[in-house]
Image (tube, rainbow, N blue to C red):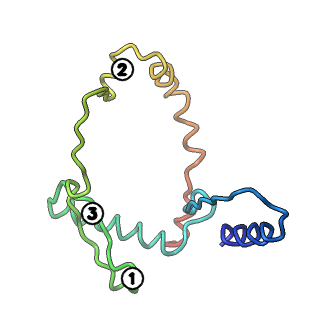
Amino acid sequence: MLIQMVETELEKRKQQGTYKGGFGGQSHFFGYEGRCGLPTNFDSTYCYALGYGVAALLQSGKTGLISSVGNLCAPVEEWIVGGTALTSLMDVERRHGIHCDLAELLLCPNTYFLNFYSLHDILSPCCYIYLNVLSLMFYC
């Protein structure tokens, strides 16, 4: 909506001759984490359903699946919780260049990565600052 308002205003100014530039707005959706807000009831219910799906898949011995929830426009009682094969979400990509995994990064002389990795123990406690346990209030 903001982009449309800016476009409308700039077009008006172009017609008046007071603006000669160009504008190409780009929008981006920030979830509740990006807005620094609490999760909505939908977010909490959706994640609960995903977790329920994971538990059901594990209990029935299904591996190689990712929990999925469908029919989200319907009431919660009509949501369809299931599993989707991970391989259906993947795309085979052939590369003829750099291939590095964690073991290779630790073994090969990559100074930047090794310097960053050496800070792991120092930086790890800082991560707990960003935990948000307030979403529990939706179920308490």
Q: Which mark is residue 106?
A: 2
Q: Residue at x 26, y 56 (%)?
A: 89
**Residue 98: x percent and y percent?**
31, 26
Position of 87 with respect to 128 (left or right) is: left
Nearest-to-viewer mark from 3 and 2 = 2
Residue identifier under label 1: 76
**Residue 103: x percent and y percent?**
30, 24
Q: Residue at x 78, y 66 (%)?
A: 14
**Residue 56: x percent and y percent?**
23, 66
Question: Which kind of residue does numbered mark 1 sit on?
Answer: Val
Position of 6 with respect to 87 (left or right) is: right
Nearest-to-viewer mark from 1 and 3 = 1
Residue 123 occupies quadrant: top right
Q: Which mark is residue 28?
A: none
Residue 63 occupies quadrant: bottom left
- Marks 1 and 2 sit apart, C-alpha to C-alpha, by 46 Å
Circle 1: element type: helix
